[in-house]
Image (spheres, coloured by chain):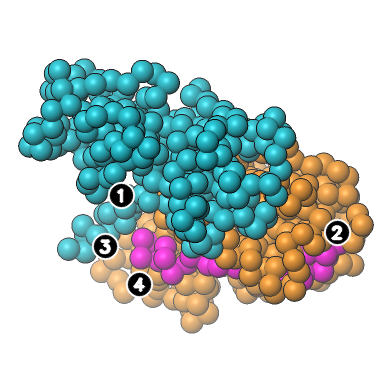
Amino acid sequence: MLNDSLILGIETSCDETAAAIVRGGRQILSNVINSQVVVHKKFGGVVPEVASRKHIENIARVVEHAFRDASLEYGDIDAVAVTNRPGLVGALLVGVSFAKGLAYALDKPLLGVNHLQGHIYANFLEHPEVEFPLVCLVVSGGHTSLVYMREEGSFEIMGETRDDAAGEAFDKVARFLGLGYPGGPAVEGAARLGEEGIYHLPRVFLDKDDFEFSFSGLKTATMNLWNKLKRDGKQVEVHHLAAEFQAALVEVLVEKTISAARHKGVETVLLAGGVAANRALRARLEGRAREEGLLLYCPSPVLCTDNAAMIAACAHSDYTRRRWAPLTLNAHPGLSSL
Amino acid sequence: MLVLAIDSATPVAGVALVAEDRVLKEVFLNHRQTHSQTLMVMVDEVLKQAEVGLKDIDGIAVSRGPGSFTGLRIGLATAKGLAMGSAKPLVGVPTLDALAYNMCLFEGIICPVLDARKQEVYTAFYRGLGTGVERLSEYRACSPQALVDEIQERGVRRVAMLGDGALRYPEFFQQALGSKLVWPPPNLLLPRASSLGLLALERLRQGQYDDVMTLVPVYVRLSEAENRLRLGAV
Ligand SMILES: [Zn+2]
């Protein structure tokens, strides 16, 4: 059945080995995530070769686990969907190669999925009522993008980051301030104990009329401020600095998202990606959306981080339209287009 | 018995279908390293042209390493997917064993040499047994010079070298080893999936195979980052 499809999703684009089975693009039957955060912690960031080694070690077990949790036999699924772009190419290749072998052996269609589109679809898993057209802010360690969706399966990138992704800025500042890894939760935790406005950092909006982001300036300003305070022999209140950094970053993300929604005249705004789990971002965006009369949806934290349920959900529309991938499907590291 | 063999450990990609007494079909590609795009197409071609379905085979063989890290994972991930989906046993065969097997009729020391980059090679020594090979040393990564030194120390009289690592430093090996060195013809110089399949078939006949869930490549080397961490920690 096309609309009641059972799709196995596989995700290995970064440091999570994940597999999930989703029915009809909306209902999660299983969602298994094997995180490597602990492994990469000792390196202070994701090491591509180490991530790839972990993926090949885990992939078969994670997929088997997804079938077991869903109480399904391998042959019960209708298609195999796999993230093939963007991401760490060596890591992607493990998932893509495994998916190809499995789909071929089961004689099921293969679907290649864009990781970013996957993040957006995490919303549809929990909010099937979401209506198009909409604007989605995708924020993670790898991306900061504003995406306009006119309808199912249609993606237009309105703006992206010109340098660091939001999550990357969190990681770099966390490392600089000695707050630990991963940076998002570390900065958020520190910021909760501090107060914004005690220090002053710039809100980098770039051109008011477009939807591009830039966070490397904010990162540098944070480091410069710290260095200056040290030089002047002043005590640096790390919590206040973390709070101000987070507030500056969040304000730019939120205001750009609101103006993108206004620009497109949509009534629905989505939040997606790993940084969408940040409570300061969610709270501020909720507040602004309410003021603007916009409907805001965001996935629960477990679906914000990389997972395969979102990949399976996203693949559903390609599956029903029979946009199946050939055996030559390759992995692509670059952002390129959606 | 029928074995489907898959190899993408080095710049060569190969797929073969072998039985005890014959090679039914073999594809060998030594042209550009786009294994992720070519490997499954080759699997499909081999099975279709031999009119064999995955359900008809008795096992899947894969080159386990050492070799190119990414190449090894493309091969193993593909093989794992195929094995899981078809419920067929999976056999990981060391890349150097399969390469040495090309020369199993050679009377002398067989020395497969793979390019390990960073001015090093992956290698081990073997003895030909006519219908197989016997490994005489551990798999290791070393400089071409260290390899030559060991050959001299062992008092080897005749050594056959093969593999992309040997082809990377041909003049060096020729000069260092002189008339001791034997070069196989080009059709035996690089990994053949048929060799891999025949070695795997032997293991399957003995009832041995690997666990699809836990099989990992033999890298021989740590990753750069792990190496740095280890050195820094000492
Ligand atoms: Zn992601």
* Residue bearing the label numbered 2: A5
Q: Please provide the residue range marked out in magenta.
A: A22-44
Q: Is residue B14 visible?
A: yes
Ligand 1 shown in quarter: bottom right
Q: Looking at the image, which residue is at 49% across and 35% down?
A: B193
Quadrant containing the N terminus of chain A in the rendered view: bottom right
* Residue bearing the label numbered 4: A236
Residue at mark 3: chain: A
Give the mark toward the camera: 2 or 3. Answer: 2
The answer for how far apart the CA atoms under marks 1 and 2 are is: 43 Å
Labels 4 and 3: the sequence-earlier one = 3
* Residue bearing the label numbered 1: B221
Rendering colour (chain B): cyan
* Residue bearing the label numbered 3: A231
The answer for how far apart the CA atoms under marks 2 and 3 are is: 62 Å
Mark 4: amino acid:
Val
Q: Looking at the image, which residue is at 49% across and 59% down?
A: B207
